Image (cartoon, helix red, strand yellow):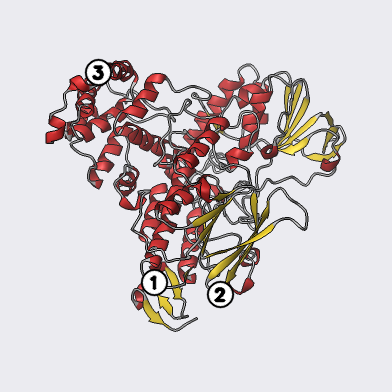
């Protein structure tokens, strides 16, 4: 204890704070308390066999850790003593454990094996990596006139803006909407919310006092708006503005970005041009609604719209509603509106697996909110445990076992056990309506599509006013949907839940790189691909966030992924700005790009998303997987940390080329190309 802390006694602690602590501790997550105790006391006894937590079943928080009641009480008592000492001024004995110890802590808290490679990533999320700090003033040598354009102010763009501002890099964020939030600003349909715990669906540098474990759209959107104010980045954002085109200028090594008013469709709309040294696309995968090619859809007399464009003030009470599609949006909308509509007809092409969702709509108790907000190390470790449960835990079960004898129902023994569990769950949810089982039970292995969270989908299917139709739609008339078998389904409202154009990335604006080549032409042969999902040859000084093969098909928080990608782009900018004088361009090496993408597809060839009989939005028309990553989160994290300018060709303003590949020596001067 330092001299200052030693003069502070527990008497200085607010009695009301202590009372809240005493009320909250009985319901605390014991595995998280154990990790906090190790930080505060430095005593490794908390990792001994007596305190080893058991395996987590399903996606439960496992608050008891599987420990006997007397051991739980021992942990709570010790936690109270350590927290009060910390509150009185005693510093943590072990603020940041060594990487090996962090892995041991993770393993102990989740009760199962965790890869050694997790150590550096966990350390970074706990604040042990200076490169992830927001305030980087003085770390970047930014020349006069240097400017970055970020396209989009959603989750990714907002993160990029905060990091750019922290580095002192002038930038402009172009946002077509009137507010930040991206998908959370646009998707306002009934029941919209996260299927990932919002304690990890949030920035590591911007904690929140969430009212629900799985927040609904309004609270999530409010969080991102608050973050934009909290970090003061709104002054960088041009709202109501869309990017029409971005064109690379080889001579000046910069970009011309053409923008216009987003709500003005006239030919003489207000057009502006911005010059940028760097362009960062933060438009994401799921930003362009995909409408089905159904004959007569445009002739329907009533409201007919994509779920992402739910009309303001639409009242569905007593209406006959048709929902086309049964993906993530439909699974939220259908249970939300079924109790108030007169008839609800759902047309599906394939069925969906959905996991039990015990905490759907459940509030975070005041005691838990106190612990998450007030206790040191508690929320960071709660987040790490959630990240393991919802992210990489199932990755191994998504690998195809070529010797498995039942590929029609599963891809390996563990996957088959998952299937048994989910089938049992579906049967339980259907109750007396087991006749509906063929209509809702998928005929492909679990996790073949992103596992959804059951908001009451299966129970809703048993309602008298709900019908699920498996026949294809032949056409739409003014007041009805006609299926291929000739049946007529009358409707007042049609809600289209057919997802987004996820395979045609960067389709919301025209992107022209070296030689004026359009990105659509560039990707025509194989589909969208990029090195680390971030950079592609032929498009210097251009980076993508949430690019090809970065979606988390095996589950987890996209926010952590985006933070990792933003940090990667920032590390490249830092290296280039601090190394080169004058204009420069950074372009990923073709060999590095190609080798990486071969690795991606080879990994996918061994995974569930290329399994025979599977169909999903992850693949393009050629069958190439373009959306999800085949890698664990820690694998990808290490890839971004180990990649630098050596993977790029850097050219400076006097046209001298700097080949940064290891074979030629770092920054060695070479011939212009």
Q: Residue at x 61, y 74 (%)?
A: 515
Q: Which residue is denoted by mark 2 in the rendering?
A: 250
As drawn, the residue found furthest toward the bottom would be: 671
Q: Which residue is denoted by mark 3 in the rendering?
A: 73
Q: Which residue is denoted by mark 1 in the rendering?
A: 580
Residue 437 vs 537, above or below: the answer is above
Q: Residues within 10 Å of mark 2 (few under 14, many from 20)?
A: some
Res 555 seen here: no
Q: Residues within 10 Å of mark 3 (few under 14, many from 20)?
A: some
Closer to the chain start, of discs 1 and 3, is: 3
The reply to whether callout 1 and callout 2 are in contact (CB within 8 Å) is no
Q: Quadrant of residue 624?
A: bottom right
Residue 459 vs 486, above or below: the answer is above
Q: Is residue 637 left or right of residue 415?
A: left
Query: Which of the two discs, 3 and 2, sits closer to the camera?
Result: 2
Closer to the chain start, of discs 3 and 2, is: 3
Measure the alpha-carbon separation of dots 1 and 2: 17 Å
Measure the alpha-carbon separation of dots 3 and 2: 67 Å
Res 75 seen here: yes
Q: Is residue 276 left or right of residue 491?
A: left
Q: Is residue 593 left or right of residue 126?
A: right
- Residue 81 bears which disc, if any? none
Closer to the chain start, of discs 1 and 2, is: 2
Q: Residues within 10 Å of mark 1 (few under 14, many from 20)?
A: some
Q: Nearer the viewer, residue 201 or 196?
A: 201
Q: Position of residue 240 (x, y in %)?
A: 64, 47
Secondary structure found at label 2: loop
Q: Position of residue 231 (x, y in %)?
A: 44, 43
Measure the alpha-carbon separation of dots 1 and 3: 59 Å
Secondary structure found at label 3: helix
The reply to whether callout 1 and callout 3 are in contact (CB within 8 Å) is no
Secondary structure found at label 1: loop
């Amino acid at each position: 204890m330092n001299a200052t802390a030693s003069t502070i006694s527990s008497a200085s602690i607010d009695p009301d704070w202590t009372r809240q602590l005493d009320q909250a501790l009985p319901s605390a997550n014991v595995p998280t308390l154990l990790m906090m105790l190790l930080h505060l006391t430095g005593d490794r006894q908390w990792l001994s066999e007596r305190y080893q937590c058991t395996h987590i079943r399903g996606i439960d928080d496992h608050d008891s850790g599987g420990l006997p009641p007397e051991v739980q009480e021992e942990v709570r008592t010790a936690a109270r003593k350590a927290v009060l000492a910390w509150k009185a001024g005693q510093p943590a004995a072990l603020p940041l454990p060594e990487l090996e110890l962090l892995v041991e802590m993770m393993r102990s808290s989740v009760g199962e094996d965790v890869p050694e490679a997790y150590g550096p990533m966990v350390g970074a999320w706990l604040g042990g990596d200076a490169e992830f700090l927001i305030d980087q003033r003085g770390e970047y040598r930014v020349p006069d006139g240097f400017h970055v354009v970020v396209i989009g102010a959603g989750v990714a763009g907002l993160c990029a803006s905060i990091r750019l501002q922290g580095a002192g890099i002038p930038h402009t964020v172009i946002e077509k909407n009137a507010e930040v939030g991206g998908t959370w600003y646009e998707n306002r349909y009934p029941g919209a919310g996260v299927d990932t715990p919002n304690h990890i669906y949030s920035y590591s540098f911007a904690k929140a006092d969430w009212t629900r474990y799985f927040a609904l759209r309004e609270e999530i959107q409010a969080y991102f708006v608050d973050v934009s104010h909290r970090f003061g980045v709104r002054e960088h954002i041009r709202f109501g503005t869309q990017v029409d085109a971005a064109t690379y200028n080889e001579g000046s090594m910069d970009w011309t970005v053409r923008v216009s008013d987003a709500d003005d469709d006239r030919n003489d709309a207000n057009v502006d041009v911005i010059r940028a040294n760097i362009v960062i696309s933060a438009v994401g995968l799921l930003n362009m609604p995909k409408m089905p090619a159904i004959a007569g859809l445009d002739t329907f007399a009533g409201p007919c719209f994509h779920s992402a464009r739910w009309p303001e003030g639409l009242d569905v009470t007593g209406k006959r509603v048709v929902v086309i599609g049964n993906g993530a949006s439909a699974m939220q909308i259908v249970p939300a509106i079924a109790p108030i509509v007169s008839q609800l007809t759902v047309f599906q092409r394939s069925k969906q697996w959905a996991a039990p969702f015990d905490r759907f709509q459940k509030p975070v108790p005041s005691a838990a909110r106190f612990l998450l907000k007030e206790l040191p190390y508690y929320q960071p470790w709660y987040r790490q445990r959630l990240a393991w449960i919802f992210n990489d835990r199932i990755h191994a079960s998504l690998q195809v076992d070529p010797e498995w004898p039942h590929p029609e129902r599963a891809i390996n023994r563990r996957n088959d056990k998952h299937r048994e569990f989910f089938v049992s769950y579906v049967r339980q949810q259907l109750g007396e309506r087991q006749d509906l089982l063929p209509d809702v039970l998928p005929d492909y292995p679990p996790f073949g599509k992103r596992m959804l969270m059951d908001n009451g989908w299966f129970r809703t299917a048993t309602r008298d006013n709900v019908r699920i139709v498996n026949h294809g739609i032949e056409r739409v008339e003014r007041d009805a949907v006609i299926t291929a078998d000739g049946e007529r389904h009358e409707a007042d409202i049609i809600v289209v839940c057919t997802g987004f154009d996820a395979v045609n990335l960067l389709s919301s604006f025209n992107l022209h790189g070296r030689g004026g080549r359009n990105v659509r032409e560039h990707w025509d042969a194989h589909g969208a691909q990029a090195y680390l999902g971030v950079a592609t040859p032929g498009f210097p000084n251009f980076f993508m966030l949430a690019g090809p093969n970065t979606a988390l098909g095996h589950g987890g928080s996209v926010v952590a992924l985006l933070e990792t990608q933003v940090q990667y782009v920032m590390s490249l900018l830092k290296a280039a700005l601090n190394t080169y004088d004058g204009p420069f361009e950074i372009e990923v090496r073709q060999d590095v790009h190609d080798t990486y993408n071969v690795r991606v597809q080879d990994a996918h060839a061994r995974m569930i998303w290329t399994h025979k009989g599977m169909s999903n939005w992850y693949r393009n028309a050629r069958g190439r997987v373009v959306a999800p990553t085949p890698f664990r989160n820690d694998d990808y994290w290490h890839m971004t940390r180990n990649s630098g300018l050596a993977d790029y060709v850097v050219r400076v303003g006097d046209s001298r080329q700097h080949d940064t590949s290891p074979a030629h020596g770092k920054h060695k001067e070479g011939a212009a190309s």
